[in-house]
Image (spheres, grey):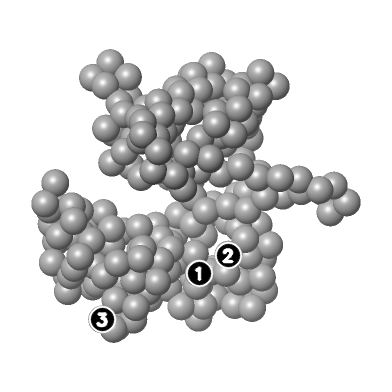
Amino acid sequence: MWHRAVTRDDVPYERIFLNIDIDLIKQLSTPKTDLYRCFDVSDPKEINILNLGSDAFDDYVNFCDELIPTLDKDAYGNDIHQRILLAEILLLANKVHKIKKQPRNIIPPFLEKVTHFIDENLADDLSLAAFSKHFYLNSTYLDRYFKRYMGLSLHQYVTEKRIEQAKQLLRAGKNVTEVCAKSGFGNYSNFIRSFNKRVGISPGKYRTKYQSK
């Protein structure tokens, strides 16, 4: 689920975030140690947040501080060093995931219904008018309320979910035209443009990339 940071306006903060490809996580995993487990949420409405204790937080920051300088350099052994550090970070996350209980969901129950409605109807009409009709609310109010908590407008959120759906279908070998329809993109050109913008390559090239593996 997409989210935003909820912070106090008068307190500065810093973020350290990593974008790790699922395939890489699987490569770093072993038959006995599934490093993707901490990201696998069985309930699609659940927000998968890990609260690090002070020791785990310090470890995470130290791993990241060691990892970041290696990303833009081609020095000998950097690729191995990166994989070791990523494995350490993923191990840390999974250990915290195993021993910590999930915090209470801070998303209002009504928005859980909205996100569930989106998940169940990705291939259908998800315009603001459709939301307004289904939930009996003014579309402008609903859109603002959604963005207040989710950090994205309804249109942006729906598009991101549809792109994720498209990626899953493409990895499964579906053809681009079929994926366009099943992901809810009524316009083929819009699908190609939106996918390219968010993923960095065309749907066809993305499909070929995964079919060749």
Is residue 194 in view?
yes
Judged from the image, the secondary structure of the residue bearing numbered disc 2 is: loop
Judged from the image, the secondary structure of the residue bearing numbered disc 1 is: helix
Look at the numbered discs 1 and 3 and tell me whether their residues touch, using CB distance below 8 Å: no
Q: What residue does disc 1 label? A: 156
Give left or right: position of 21 versus 140.
left
What distance separates the C-alpha of mark 2 from that of mark 1? 6 Å
For image coordinates 36% across by 34% down, the residue present is 76
Look at the numbered discs 2 and 3 and tell me whether their residues touch, using CB distance below 8 Å: no
Label 3 crowd (10 A; few <14 / some 14-19 / many >=20): some
What distance separates the C-alpha of mark 2 from that of mark 3? 24 Å
Q: Which numbered marker is on residue 169?
A: none
> Where in the figure is residue 7, as x and y percent of width and height?
76, 48
Look at the numbered discs 2 and 1 and tell me whether their residues touch, using CB distance below 8 Å: yes
Label 1 crowd (10 A; few <14 / some 14-19 / many >=20): few
Three-letter code for the amino acid on which mark 2 is drawn = Leu
For image coordinates 17% across by 74% down, the residue present is 177
Q: Which numbered marker is on residue 152?
A: 2
In this rendering, is residue 3 above or below 155?
above
